[in-house]
Amino acid sequence: MGFSPYYKALFTQPFILQMVAIIQADMQSALNLVTGVTFNPATPTLGLQSYIEYDLAVMPPGNVPQLIVTPPRVLKIDEGSQLTERSGGMLEFITTVGNQSPNVLAQNLQMYLRALAYVIDTAESNAASDQSQMYQSLPISLPFWTPTTTTPIQTGSLIYMRVVSMEFGNLYRNQQGFLQAASLLARIDLEEV
C-alpha cells in the first residue's frame, strides 16, 4: 500500500525560488530608489547594478554582485498543528559586492541590504493584480535550474514575512581583496495544507 499524505507541504523550497524570482524582477527598481540614481549599463559608475549571480548554497562568487538565498538553518515545525503543516524560521540572504575601496564597499553593502529589505518587506503587497506575487508563477533565470518559471506557493500559505536583522560583521574583519559580504535575515511563517 502506497503512502498518501493528507497534506502537500513543500516547506521552503518553492518559497525560496519564488523570492529569487521576485528579487530578480524588483531589485533594480529598489536599488534605483535607494541610491536616487537610475542605473545605466553605459555609465556603470553611476548607481548600483542588480545582482548578476544568484545561488542557493553558500559559495564563493563567480560574479558580483552576488545574492545567496539559503533555507533556515532550523525550520521549526509546529507539532500541534493538525491537518496543516505550520513551520517557520529565518531565511538568510547573503550579498557579496566588489570594489577597490573598502569604504565604497561598506557604503554599497548598506545600500544593497536596504534595497533588498524593501523588496522582501513589500513582496506580498507588490502585486500587479489583486493576488500577491507569492502565489503567481513568475519568470526566473538561474543557470543551474532548468525551469524558466516558478511553481508558486500555496495560496494563503505565507502567514508572516519580515526582515528582522542585517549582519555587517564582515566589515569589521581586515580582509584582503576587493570583495565584501553582508547578510539579511527574514523571518517567515508558513501554513500549508
Image: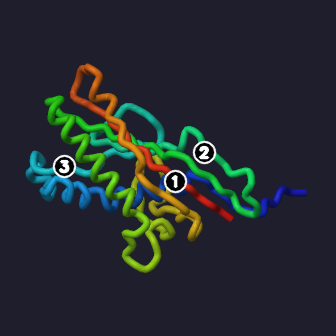
Q: For the point 26% across and 21% down, which residue is it?
A: 175
Real-space Cα separation, disc 2 to disc 1, in angstroms: 10 Å
User: Which class describes the residues within 10 Å of circle 3: few (<14), some (14-19), or many (20+)?
Assistant: many
Tell me which label, 2 or 1, sits earlier in the chain.
2
Q: Looking at the image, which residue sits at the far right?
A: 1
> Where is mark 3, residue-wise?
48
2 and 1 marks in contact (CB < 8 Å)? no
Per the model, the C-alpha gap separating discs 1 and 3 is 28 Å
Tell me the tag on residue 162.
none
Q: Earlier in the sequence, mark 2 or mark 3?
A: 3
Q: Residue at x 36, y 37 (%)?
A: 167
Which residue is more in the foreground, 66 or 35?
35
Residue 75 is marked as: 2
Q: Tell me which residue sits at (40%, 79%) in the image.
A: 129
Spot occupied by residue 14 in the image (x, y as percentages of width and height): 54, 56
Which of the 4 quarters of the picture holds residue 193?
A: bottom right
Q: How far apart are marks 2 and 3 (CA)?
A: 33 Å
Given the image, on which type of amino acid does mark 1 rest?
A: Ile
Q: Which of marks 2 and 3 is in front?
A: 2
Q: What residue type is labelled 2?
A: Leu
Q: In the rendered view, would you say 96 is above or below 91?
A: above
Question: Residue 127, how many percent across, how many down?
Answer: 39, 72
Judging by the rendered image, the residue that carries numbered circle 1 is: 188
* Quadrant in which residue 141 is drawn: bottom left
Q: In this view, does 181 lie to the left or right of 134?
A: left
Q: Is mark 2 on a helix, strand or loop?
A: loop
